[in-house]
Amino acid sequence: MNEKISKMLCKRDDTLLACMRVINTNAKGIVFVIDEERKLCGVVTDGDIRRALLEGKDLQLKVGEILKNNYVYADYDESETEMLNKFNGKINIIPLVNERMEVQDFLECAASIRIPVAKPELSGNEFKYAVEALLSTWISSNGKYIPEFEKKFAEYCETEYGVAVSNGTVALHLALVALGIGKDDEVIVPDLTFAATINSVLQANATPVIVDVEQDSWCIDPNEIEKAITPKTKAIMPVHIYGQPCDMDKIMAIAKKYNLYVIEDCAEAHGAKYNGKKVGSFGDVGCFSFFANKVITTGEGGMCTTKSEFLAEKMRILRDHGMSKSKKYYHEVVGYNYRMTNIQAAIGLAQLERIDALLLQRELLEDMYNEELSEIKSVVLQSRNIDKRYKINWLISILVQPEKRDFTIEILRGDGIEARPFFYPLSKMDIYKKYTFSNKNSLEISKCGLNLPTSVDMKKESVIKIKKVMQQIF
Ligand SMILES: *Cc1c(COP(=O)(O)O)cnc(C)c1O
């Protein structure tokens, strides 16, 4: 028997004091109790001993006297999932026994989170293509996967051109620069979004103008956009937040009326549709992210989509140090290195092959959540099927009473379930608040919102478990 295990064991007729000494040396807060034949017969935690003493028991009492028979252990015949399911917020060490009930080892739940909010799904050709990219030795930003990924992604988005870049934030910045937006220009952004949206505007030296969102969709409010327009306004940056498409009919009509550019932030909405048409195909440029928690991933990565050959070409030049396409090492504009690598594109292509299946699985998960959580009256689920919008599921998003939101997240975490609060409204952060034009719904939504685990391999049991935890709170 190894030393690690021997430090975890006590005999049934050892005293409570002796057990406490063992716990003190193993620093795990628990001992496994064995009988004369070395078979496991129970576990005792430091809490159990404390409670025994408080009940007036003596330190010389034999530990066998306080053993309960409903302790948890695992054996080698169980699957990993069965073993993992034995952990909960309270139990985080489990003895592992052989067929004679002898303790061989123990399982420890090191990271207390077992159901993460998101995790990438890489079970298709990701590995194969990435290895092919490596074997080809084209590991930087030349190689066959980049143009192929760009072409197929543009097709998927029902538009003409794709320009692959290093991440979603630089996709936004590249679009702004390619459209000539900079100093003295204003760009309208929603209050409820991830900070990359507004950061890209500031990085382009333009002035962001923050406007409120719609109450039902949580997306930028077209009426607020129109009110915020000034002679300096050059562009609107609608964000399809948490997979929900913005009201593109109204936004495109406003853009036309006032002669403004539209840059869609599609980082959370791959495959979402408005009026049957994919997001990223409405505006002058659509910007996507392939960060690890997004609908499809390349690790880090992003893409600009556009119908304009001119813009695509301009973005390609800016992406590659502003270098002339015809005259090598002659620079026409001050550019950037925003390129994606061939290895990333290889992974992206494999992800794209399965995007519809992945989205479908996410939708089934949404169905499960809707079915279970609709039993809890005070939980509001993200709206589906608002007028012409077909949303996709990036992260399952719900609203609860604001005073219970953070508590809910904590309780879920105690049960190994990761949940996270919505983004802070931009207008509530010191560095951005001076750009606020309007906010109201955004404040309310942000205070009440949380995202629940949304990995495609999630089981119904996990959703039911989440419901049960939430039922206790509400
Ligand atoms: C993730 C995200 C981005 C930025 O993407 P990165 O690839 O992480 O740079 C931009 N906008 C929104 C709304 C996002 O959610």
Image (cartoon, rainbow, N blue to C red):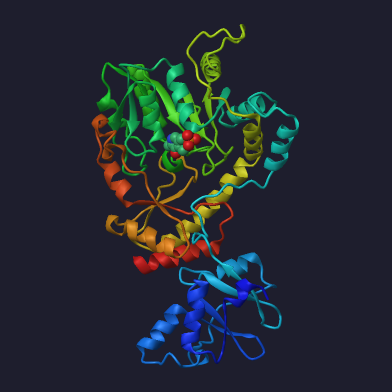
- Towards the viewer: 36 or 279: 36
Give left or right: position of 285 versus 141: left
Q: Position of residue 460 (x, y in %)?
A: 54, 62
Q: Which residue corresponds to the image point at 36% horizontal and 17% vertical from the top-left?
A: 182
- Towards the viewer: 372 or 76: 76
The relative height of residue 218 versus residue 183 in the rendered view (above or below) is below
| Quarter occupied by the N terminus | bottom right
Q: Position of residue 48 (x, y in %)?
A: 44, 82
Which of the 4 image quadrants contains residue 210? top left
Residue 209 visible in the current orientation: yes
Give left or right: position of 61 versus 423: right
- Towards the viewer: 47 or 237: 47
Which of the 4 image quadrants contains residue 425? top left
- Towards the viewer: 224 or 459: 459
Tally of numbered tags: 0
The relative height of residue 184 versus residue 23 in the rendered view (above or below) is above
The relative height of residue 315 versus residue 371 in the rendered view (above or below) is above
Q: Position of residue 404 (x, y in %)?
A: 31, 59
| Quarter occupied by the C terminus | bottom left
Q: Position of residue 316 (x, y in %)?
A: 56, 18
The relative height of residue 154 versus residue 397 in the rendered view (above or below) is above
Q: Which residue corresponds to the image point at 62% horizontal and 34% vertical from the top-left?
A: 344
Q: Which residue corresponds to the image point at 34% horizontal and 39% vertical from the top-left?
A: 192
Residue 238 visible in the current orientation: no
